[in-house]
Amino acid sequence: MKRLSLLLLSAGLLSACSHIPFLKQDEVAQAPVMRKSAQPELAADGTRRVMVNGVEVQKVAFRAGISSATVERLAKAESCQGGYGAGLVSEPGPVEVYRMACDNGKVFLARCELRQCAAMPSGQGAPGIAK
């Protein structure tokens, strides 16, 4: 009995679907077309957007940290000057990673543990940080 009622219910639903009015060709032609809006050329910070292999490079806002001045002195000793200075790229805490963009196009990275800072080798990067 349950199977019969389920079968009749299914048939009723299918027949109800056949009575739904579909758009005619004239209505399809007049339907508004949804277009994807073009991305603005500038990022939120006012600089140009950068694309690498079709993927937008996410920019990290500059944040000064407790050891920013120390890292800037380390960078200056290795002929790196310019930009905003040394910005904190990791979360504040006992171990911090700083990044500084040099005028010559290179990137200076430093790791500070309990305010004791050391330059990171050029081949080594912080986890999740692109050079």
Image (cartoon, grey):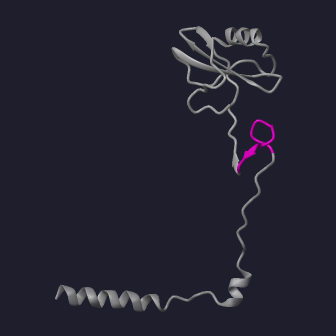
The residue at the point 74 percent across, 46 percent down is 51
Q: Magenta: predominant secondary structure element?
A: loop
| In this view, 112 is above or below 106 | above
| In this view, 106 is above or below 114 | below
| In this view, 56 is above or below 29 | above
The answer to which quarter of the image holds residue 107 is top right
- Inspect the magenta stretch and tell me whether residue 45 lies in it: yes
- Residue lying farthest to the left in this orientation: 1
- Inspect the magenta stretch and tell me whether residue 41 lies in it: no
Location of residue 84 in the rendering, given as x and y in whole percent from the top left corner: 77, 21
Location of residue 82 in the rendering, given as x and y in whole percent from the top left corner: 81, 19
Q: Is residue 99 left or right of residue 6?
A: right
Q: Which residues are magenta?
A: 42-53
The residue at the point 53 percent across, 9 percent down is 114
Quarter of the rendering occupied by the N terminus? bottom left
Location of residue 95 in the rendering, given as x and y in whole percent from the top left corner: 53, 16
Location of residue 55 in the rendering, given as x and y in whole percent from the top left corner: 68, 48
Q: Nearer the viewer, residue 16 or 80?
A: 80
Q: Nearer the viewer, residue 100 or 59?
A: 100
The answer to which quarter of the image holds residue 21 is bottom right
The residue at the point 68 percent across, 12 percent down is 71
Quarter of the rendering occupied by the C terminus? top right
Q: Is residue 110 left or right of residue 93?
A: right
| In this view, 41 is above or below 35 | above
The residue at the point 83 percent across, 23 percent down is 104
Across the whole image, how many numbered discs are drawn on residues?
0
The answer to which quarter of the image holds residue 77 is top right
